Amino acid sequence: MKTYHLLIAILFFASCNRILQQSESLPNNIQVIDVNESDIIRNGKLSDLISIDSLVFLEYTDESLIGTIDKVIVSDKYIYIVDKETTNAIYRFDRRGNFFNSYKKSGRGPQEYLKLNDVSIFQDNIYVSAEPNQFFVLDKNLTFVKSVDIKWTDDIPLPQFGHYFSIINSDTVLFYHPSASYHYHLYDLNKEAFVSSQIKRRGTFDISDHRSLTRNASGKIYLSRNYNDTIYTLRDNRFTPEYIVNFEQPMTDEEIKERLRLTVYNAFKFPPVQKMHHVNEFINSEDYISFEFVFKRQGYFYFYHKEKNSVKIFNNSLENDFFLNPTIGHYQNSNITYMDVADLLENRELLSFSIPDNLTYDSNPPLVFYKPKFE
């Protein structure tokens, strides 16, 4: 029997009262989330701990061939797949996986781009950032609507190697800039100008990506940072702390400073710090709080059920009877990832769910909408 190993395993906690609490010593009633190594479950099957809400087998045609799924955006009617690395395109499927169309236009015109950077959705509009300097809007059918001229400045220059963003509302864009003095910048589309810069960079290794900036079903924005235990939310166009992830073995301030002082060259001469850090994909859904982090060079997920006040933890050494990849999106109360087609075909008899008869090694990876099981 071939076992499946999680690339990112899921963390649940055992002791409820000390997991999520109000701290009187912290301002603004910041909630504290405790993470203890002793709570990790090291035996069992993944299928006993994860509940699959739905499987979406994406239709496979010559026009809908996807190479890499970098991001999934789900609306009430459609699923949008972003493939930045392989096909450099955006695909539109319905909620059952039926393919409609894609947007891929190579060039330098107002409706074209050389490379996708990031995609975000607000109401019925799809916003797209692409290289070399394109920012444009598509409608829900992936039809071009308009181009937007983002006016970069000397202090906030156009990033050389791409950037990430999120649409706050119809007037405001939140840009992440990897090399400016401040990481995050609010841009007013009506004023055609940057109106606020936040989260000062701390050093060479103070970096982020699209997994650090998340949005829940109600539209609330969450921000995490490498080597930082604070989770921020955007309120009145300002990032404010809302959660503290209290690791049992946190990195010390000196360890963080030393790590941030390293250059890219020097980083290869030192092993990774053996502490808990790199929180990302933080989400506060209707039923539970979840995020991913790294501990001793291994990846984990964390899930905390609010009403049941219940927590569990496990790592990727479990005996897994299906294969999951890192989180690539969220929808309502489900996290979204994808499955490897080869693993499904080679272990069909071990699966607790059925797969289509026409699934082949060339098929698109199926999407998995899932959440943790709580007793």
Image: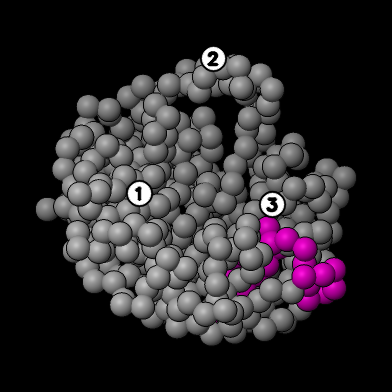
At horizontal 54% and vertical 14% (from top left) the residue drawn is 254
Q: Nearer the viewer, residue 270 or 248?
A: 270
Instruction: Tell me which amino acid carries mark 2.
Output: Glu
At horizontal 55% and vertical 21% (from top left) the residue drawn is 256
Q: Which element carries disc 2, helix, strand or loop? A: helix
The nearer-to-camera label among 3 and 1 is: 3
Q: Nearer the viewer, residue 62 or 232?
A: 62
Check whether the beta carbons of the residues at disc 3 and disc 2 lie within 8 A of each other: no
The nearer-to-camera label among 3 and 2 is: 3
The crowding category of the residue bearing disc 3, from other C-alpha atoms within 10 Å (few below 14, some 14 to 19, many at least 20), is many
Instruction: Tell me which amino acid carries mark 3.
Output: His
Q: Is residue 267 above or below residue 232?
A: above
**How far across and down, in percent of the image, does residue 10 sit?**
30, 45
Q: Which element carries disc 3, helix, strand or loop? A: loop
Q: Is residue 312 above or below residue 57?
A: above
**Disc 3: which residue:** 163
